[in-house]
């Protein structure tokens, strides 16, 4: 509440308490947390605190000058105040982004886990199907099927720190809004995670302990759907044809020939996949995790993967390559229950899709989910939360904005609006207001059309 | 066949992508050097609707039979009831923020400030969602800090609008902060449409909003000079037309439907020590609302450092209640790192999380005889 120009009612005391700068363990590709000597850290921290207190006082003085200050300050001086304030904020932000956690004297310095012991995700559970079955029968008010549909939990997340640049956070916001919209329309619950549950498995591997934890805590959930933060829904109508997967436990976008003939490192994509909540999935997660622990295990595993998978560059083990390798080397154990889906874009690689949105809008319609109207557009390689991507920034951001608007148009339609173009933020009216709005609702509400489809199926 | 064609084209695509990357005029891959303003422009200029300055502002064509329309729709759509439990109305939480990146580099991470057309949104959403019984507007700078608290829906059965506030401060003192519109409930019914119609006129940007601001400053206690805002406008409306609206407006202060951050954030540790989630009030506030911080704009009313630091603490305070469901908690209210607080077990289903948030009764599905 409140406007930009009004004099504030209350002012908090300036220079207040000392801030604590903090940082979580790093995600893949970004700066690593340094394990330093405790005393050195103390000194460093004190110095930081002093710096921040001074900065803080400086900022406050500037703000006071800018607001309480006399109205006859020339605009150039106001600009200078602006500029200073922005710089100060940036500096504070850099502090927040940069460094270490406040001291925890009880915490031992971080050591790598012993490569001779096998890493485990958690205590081995062998009777999960049974445990779950019993729980469901004892808790009928938390069924795994609701209104004839299996209960799905969409899981996504991002690192706990601000992105390296503000634009990264802006697109995280747009991406989560996009997911909130799809899930609201389709009765899917979302978990957005910003915590590293297991510091060994940070980065892209963080999804493994998270998925396991959620499965065990939510027996009422039938399918866990992991989705990367850089993946956008672009078909707001399409629903996953779950009945197709009655005999499967893992659904992932991929191509059998790339997988079994080429052994390509991009034979499947772990940016958007579904795991059934069952013993088999727990077992797969356990088999998948060993290449993940950071440090020498992950480095060495990376070499194995590069040696065995076609086209894979040299870098530490990633969850996607590891899964491909696992499914290839233990094919008989797992593949029977794995569905490599490519009839629709459970994951849709962005580069081939984003330039065709106008063509799609002209020729097709939402609900198809495939190359005519992709279900998911996934911005692999763009990495807007980091400092550098694999592709030109302008191309990535432009494309992400287009995907966002393309999807948003489908949500706004019910309310009678659409974006003016696929790039800009502004919207325009496409339907006049009416005194009988419910006729439109009957026609256009996505929730109702998908509900009808379920009814006829069951 | 189509399948291998698709695979082939994908492969070609990736190679082409690499070529294209080289050929781009601008192949800068560094996000720090990029100005997003280059991209966020509208191609279709012109044809911007300019409202007729002579026509009085209106939210849309007048509807007078909304209660009947809803009632009939609900009858023909039994699968979308407006109550999903005996005392549980269907509620739609509405919030929003600017479509453009924040003016300030840190704003996008912490929060994004909403635009001020919540009144427009409310009306549009009420009309598009007859299955919704209550709309719950929440400012983007408000955070949930009590994850266990469930609103006392039965308390509001005879009311159509619920805001945090005090009767005396509004009706006796005419104080502009006698209530807060950062978090409020609006029932989906004719009364609400009429209220929105009466509330909106001070809103239109420009001369109308400026002039209205002067009236509000004059009429309301302690209000500074600035353009009309939705909060002052509704205080003014309630005071002026109390007989018309007052009876259906509940000014709630038994819990923090909106909780001003300034008096709450320093007490989180004390709350953790002495109380527990589920109270919703001063002991454990449902909502902590960062009025005045404006992290998305350039200038807030409070020091940047205090705002950001406290927003982090409030976020963690709330997040801890979610994390404890899974056996974790933040290492401190300032820390982004988490630690385990509950050991793993081979029987995860026997573990109950402390506040019963994993499978709370308010999430229970009605068990129908025929399923």
Image: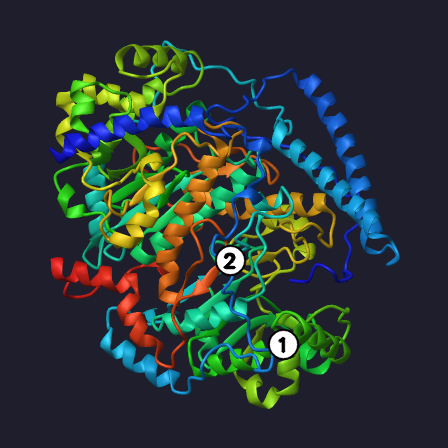
**Residue A60 makes an appearance in the image:** no
Name the quadrant of the N terminus of chain B.
Answer: top left
Q: In the image, B149: left or right of A22? A: left
Residue A264: x and y in percent read 25, 20
Residue under numbered circle 2: B45
Q: Please indicate, yes or no, whether residue A233 appears anywhere in the rendered image.
A: yes
Closest to the observer: B205 or B319?
B205
The x, y position of residue B258, in whole percent, is 59, 63
* Residue A448 sits above or below residue B244 on the image: above
| Chain under callout 1 | B
Q: Residue at x 54, y 60 (%)?
A: B280
Q: Is residue B367 above or below residue A387?
A: below
Q: Residue at x 45, y 36 (%)?
A: A396
The structure residue drawn at horizontal position 33% and vertical position 19%, both measured from the top left corner, is: A290
Q: Which residue is mark 1?
A: B202
> Element at badge 1?
helix
């Amino acid at each position: 509440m409140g406007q930009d120009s009004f004099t504030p009612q209350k002012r908090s005391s300036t220079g207040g308490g000392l801030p604590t700068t903090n940082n979580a363990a790093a995600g893949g590709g970004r700066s690593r947390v340094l394990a330093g000597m405790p005393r050195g850290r103390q000194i460093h921290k004190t110095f930081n605190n002093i710096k921040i207190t001074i900065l803080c006082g400086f900022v406050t003085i500037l703000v006071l000058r800018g607001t309480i200050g006399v109205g006859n300050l020339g605009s150039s001086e106001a600009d200078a105040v602006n500029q200073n304030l922005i710089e100060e904020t940036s500096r504070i932000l850099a502090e927040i982004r940069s460094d270490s956690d406040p001291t925890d004297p009880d915490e031992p310095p971080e050591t790598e886990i012993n490569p001779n012991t096998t890493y485990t995700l958690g205590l081995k559970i062998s009777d999960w199907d049974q445990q779950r079955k019993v729980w469901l029968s004892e808790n009928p008010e938390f069924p795994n099927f609701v209104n004839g549909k299996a209960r799905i939990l969409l899981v996504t997340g991002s690192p706990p720190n601000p992105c390296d640049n503000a634009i990264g956070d802006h697109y995280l916001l747009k991406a989560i809004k996009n997911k909130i919209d799809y899930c609201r329309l389709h009765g899917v619950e979302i978990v957005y995670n910003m915590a590293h549950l297991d510091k060994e498995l940070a980065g892209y591997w963080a999804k493994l302990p998270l998925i396991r934890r959620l499965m065990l805590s939510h027996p009422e959930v039938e399918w866990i759907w992991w989705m990367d933060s850089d993946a956008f829904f672009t078909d707001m109508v399409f629903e996953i044809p779950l009945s197709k997967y009655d005999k499967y436990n893992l659904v992932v976008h991929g191509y059998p020939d790339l997988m079994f003939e080429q052994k390509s490192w991009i034979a499947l994509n772990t940016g958007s996949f579904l795991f059934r909540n069952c013993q088999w999935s727990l077992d797969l997660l356990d088999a998948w995790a060993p290449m993940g622990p950071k440090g020498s295990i992950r480095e060495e595993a990376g070499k194995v993967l590069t040696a065995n998978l076609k086209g894979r560059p040299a870098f530490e083990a990633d969850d996607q390559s590891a899964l491909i390798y696992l499914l290839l080397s233990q094919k008989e154990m797992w593949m029977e229950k794995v569905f490599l889906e490519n009839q629709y874009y459970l994951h849709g690689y962005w580069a081939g899709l984003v330039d065709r949105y106008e063509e799609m809008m002209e020729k097709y319609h939402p609900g198809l989910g495939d190359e005519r109207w992709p279900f998911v557009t996934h911005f692999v390689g763009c990495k807007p939360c980091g400092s550098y991507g694999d592709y030109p920034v302008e191309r990535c951001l432009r494309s992400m904005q287009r995907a966002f608007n393309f999807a948003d148009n489908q949500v706004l339609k019910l309310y009678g609006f659409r974006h003016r173009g696929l790039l800009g933020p502004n919207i325009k009216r496409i339907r006049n207001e009416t005194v009988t709005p419910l006729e439109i609702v009957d026609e256009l509400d996505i929730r109702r059309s998908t509900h009808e489809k379920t009814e006829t199926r069951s | 066949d189509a399948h291998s064609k698709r695979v082939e084209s994908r492969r070609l695509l990736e190679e082409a992508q690499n070529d294209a990357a080289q050929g781009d005029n601008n192949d800068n891959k560094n996000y720090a050097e990029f100005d997003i303003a280059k991209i966020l422009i509208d191609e279709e200029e012109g044809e911007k609707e300019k409202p007729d300055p002579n026509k009085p502002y209106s939210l849309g064509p007048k509807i007078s039979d909304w209660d009947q329309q809803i009632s009939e729709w609900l009858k023909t759509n039994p699968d979308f009831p407006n109550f999903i439990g005996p005392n549980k109305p269907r509620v739609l939480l509405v919030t929003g923020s600017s479509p453009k990146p924040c003016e300030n580099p840190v704003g996008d991470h912490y929060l994004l400030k909403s635009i001020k057309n919540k009144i427009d949104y409310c009306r549009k959403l009420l009309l598009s969602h007859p299955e919704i019984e209550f709309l719950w507007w929440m400012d983007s700078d408000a955070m949930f800090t009590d994850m266990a608290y469930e609103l006392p829906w039965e308390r509001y059965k005879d009311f159509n609008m619920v805001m945090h506030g005090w009767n005396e401060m509004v009706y006796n003192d005419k104080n502009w902060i006698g209530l807060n519109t950062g978090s409020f409930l609006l029932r989906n019914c004719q009364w609400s449409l009429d209220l929105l119609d009466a509330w909106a006129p001070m809103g239109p940007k420009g001369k109308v909003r400026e002039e209205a601001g002067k009236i509000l400053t004059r009429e309301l206690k302690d209000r500074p000079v600035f353009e009309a805002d939705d909060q002052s406008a509704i205080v003014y409306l309630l005071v002026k037309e109390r007989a018309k609206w007052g009876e259906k407006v509940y000014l709630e202060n038994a819990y923090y439907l909106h909780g001003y951050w300034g008096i709450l954030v320093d007490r989180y540790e004390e709350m953790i020590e002495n109380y527990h989630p589920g109270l919703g009030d001063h002991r454990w506030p449902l909502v902590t609302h960062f009025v005045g911080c404006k992290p998305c704009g350039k200038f807030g009313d409070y020091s940047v450092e205090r705002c950001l630091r406290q927003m982090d603490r409030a976020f963690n305070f709330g997040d801890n209640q979610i994390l404890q469901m899974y056996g974790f908690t933040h290492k401190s209210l300032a820390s982004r790192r988490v630690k385990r607080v509950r050991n793993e077990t081979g029987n995860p289903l026997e573990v109950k999380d402390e506040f019963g948030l994993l499978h709370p009764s308010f999430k229970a599905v009605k068990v129908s005889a025929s399923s």
